[in-house]
Amino acid sequence: MMPDKRVAGELDEPAASTLAQVASATPLYWRTSATDAIWMRLSFLNGEHADFVVENGVISLGHADGNTLVLAGRDIAPWHARINVDQRGIVLEVLDFASRTHVNARPVREKALLRLGDVLCLGVVAMMLKPDRDDAIETTLPPEPEDGDDAADGAPTRVVLRGVAGSHFGRAIALRQRLVVGRAADCDIVVDDAQIAPHHATIETIEETICLRDMGSGTGAMVNGLRLPTAVLHQGDQIAFGRDHFLIEAPGLPLRGEVHVAPTTVDSEQAAAASADAAPADTRGSIWWLIGAAALIALGLVWILLRGA
């Protein structure tokens, strides 16, 4: 199989079709406008290669010279895979169907939608998709509610954690109140992993901010591929506790990088003043029009009665 000689950024029809199908359902954290450039990196878990920063465009991976990223290792095909990146998302295309390709330990034969935090394995080479900078995720959380009140009582029920890998795959967990994640049986999300503390972390909403907070485990969680003890989470983020990965679904809340604009409110005094200003409007013309219309209707009824007589 020969390498793709197209200009970076140009997608073939199948790739474009796949992107169009998945982009609206799974928005990505950096998609703040149609012209924003995508910046991410491939971080190699076993150190086979230095971190590789990926911009908008198309990159190929394999052991043959001529690939954008030349990889060495067992079970790496000459032209193993291609990653298509643009504002709509990231799509993995397998070029050698006989090769071993996995995303989050699940085999991929043709194509797969990728997200930050995914672990991509080509043969024995494992790499994680991360933001291009370690400081890309906000870690300063709003203050906790006073008097032990779980401000989660006012949490929007539209926030859902959807399992995308591990024992919770396919499960949707609503964030109605504060969720406790850990190994203990009394946790809201039980993760059966020796590296997870009995009560590991909490996920909650404070007003319209989704917060991850470590409970003293010391290891926190992986957020879009970055290990953090605390983090402000957004729609489309991927959070991992051990082998269990969850996607944050929060329709209506801002994506990462978007500025949330609060709706404009008008106080009662302003409303009263506006009403008073509008009151003097002249309505005499409309009253005479109604009187004239009523007179014409009355004349019409009289004419009908006279003809009937």
Image (spheres, helix red, strand yellow):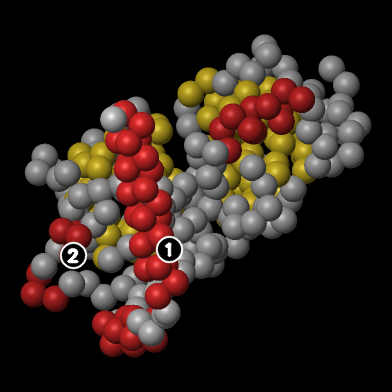
Looking at marks 1 and 2 on the same chain, the residue that comes earlier in the sequence is marked by 2
Image coordinates for residue 116, horizontal then vertical, percent: 54, 46
Between disc 1 and disc 2, the foreground one is 1
Q: Residue at x 63, y 33 (%)?
A: 20
Residue to which mark 1 is pinned: 289
Q: Residue at x 32, y 36 (%)?
A: 306
Query: Between residues 10 and 110, which one lies in front from this camera angle?
Result: 10
Residue furthest toward the top?
Answer: 98
Query: Between residues 307 and 188, which one lies in front from this camera angle?
Result: 307
Image coordinates for residue 160, horizontal then vertical, percent: 31, 43
Q: Residue at x 27, y 65 (%)?
A: 206
> In which image quadrant can residue 94 be found?
top right
Query: Between residues 74 and 212, which one lies in front from this camera angle?
Result: 212
Vertically, is 52 above or below 256? above
Q: Amino acid at mark 2?
A: Ala
The 10 Å Cα crowd at callout 2, few under 14, some 14 to 19, many 20 or more, is some
SS at badge 1: helix
> In which image quadrant can residue 294 be found?
bottom left
Quadrant that contains the N terminus: top right
Image coordinates for residue 242, horizontal then vertical, percent: 35, 42
Residue to which mark 2 is pinned: 151
Vertically, is 93 above or below 260? above
The 10 Å Cα crowd at callout 1, few under 14, some 14 to 19, many 20 or more, is few
Q: Amino acid at mark 1?
A: Trp
Quadrant that contains the C terminus: top left
Vertically, is 65 above or below 129? above
Q: Residue at x 72, y 56 (%)?
A: 35
On the picture, is 222 further left or further right than 72?
Answer: left
Q: Is residue 4 visible?
A: yes
